[in-house]
Image (tube, grey):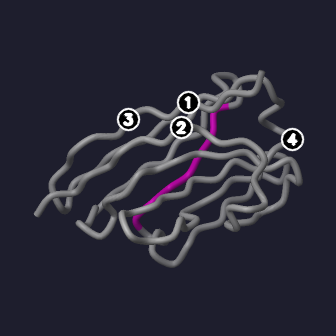
């Protein structure tokens, strides 16, 4: 069974850092695109970053460029999202997801499997 489980969320002050983890089981991580998405109350879900492990490429939304870093550890079957210089606007439920196409995309409808989501709150 495919499972994606996020961890590492919580409360952080503006300007601080947080590192999220997504442990992926039941699929070959190196053949899937793994994306991070977020959804704040009253807003649509938006893509934050993705990593295509076969091509060893990363892609970021404009809001994440320069502040967030996505990476993977294939041996640990884990994808990370390091977030720096956090802003209150980053507050949202963050979810990781897997896309079988294997190319870069931040469109949520492309993704096949989803984690349960984890809360990130940035205070000011």
Q: Which of the labelled discs sits on residue 8, or is there none? A: 3
Q: CA distance from mark 1 to mark 2?
A: 7 Å
Q: Tell me whether circle 1 and circle 4 mark residues in contact (CB < 8 Å).
A: no
Precedes in sequence: disc 2 or disc 3: 3
Q: CA distance from mark 2 to mark 3?
A: 13 Å
**Rendered location of residue 120, percent (x, y):** 32, 49
Which residue occupies the extreme front position in the image? 42
Q: CA distance from mark 3 to mark 4?
A: 25 Å
Q: Residue at x 56, y 72 (%)?
A: 61
In the rendered image, the quadrant that contains the N terminus is top right
Q: Is residue 115 above or below residue 61?
A: above
Q: Secondary structure beneath disc 3?
A: loop
Label 1 sits on residue: 5
Q: Is residue 33 above or below residue 44?
A: above
Q: Tell me whether circle 2 and circle 3 mark residues in contact (CB < 8 Å).
A: no
Precedes in sequence: disc 1 or disc 4: 1
Label 2 sits on residue: 116
Q: Is residue 108 left or right of residue 70?
A: right
Precedes in sequence: disc 1 or disc 2: 1
């Amino acid at each position: 069974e495919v499972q994606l489980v996020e961890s590492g969320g919580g409360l952080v002050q503006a300007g601080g850092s947080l590192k999220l983890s997504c442990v992926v089981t039941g699929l070959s991580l190196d053949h899937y695109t793994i994306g991070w998405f977020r959804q704040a109350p009253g807003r649509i879900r938006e893509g934050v970053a993705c990593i295509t492990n076969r091509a060893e490429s990363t892609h970021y939304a404009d809001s994440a460029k320069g502040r967030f870093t996505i990476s993977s550890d294939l041996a640990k079957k884990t994808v990370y999202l390091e977030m720096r210089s956090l802003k209150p606007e980053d507050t949202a439920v963050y979810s990781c997801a897997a896309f079988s196409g294997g190319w870069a995309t931040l469109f949520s409808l492309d993704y096949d499997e989803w984690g349960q989501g984890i809360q990130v709150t940035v205070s000011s």
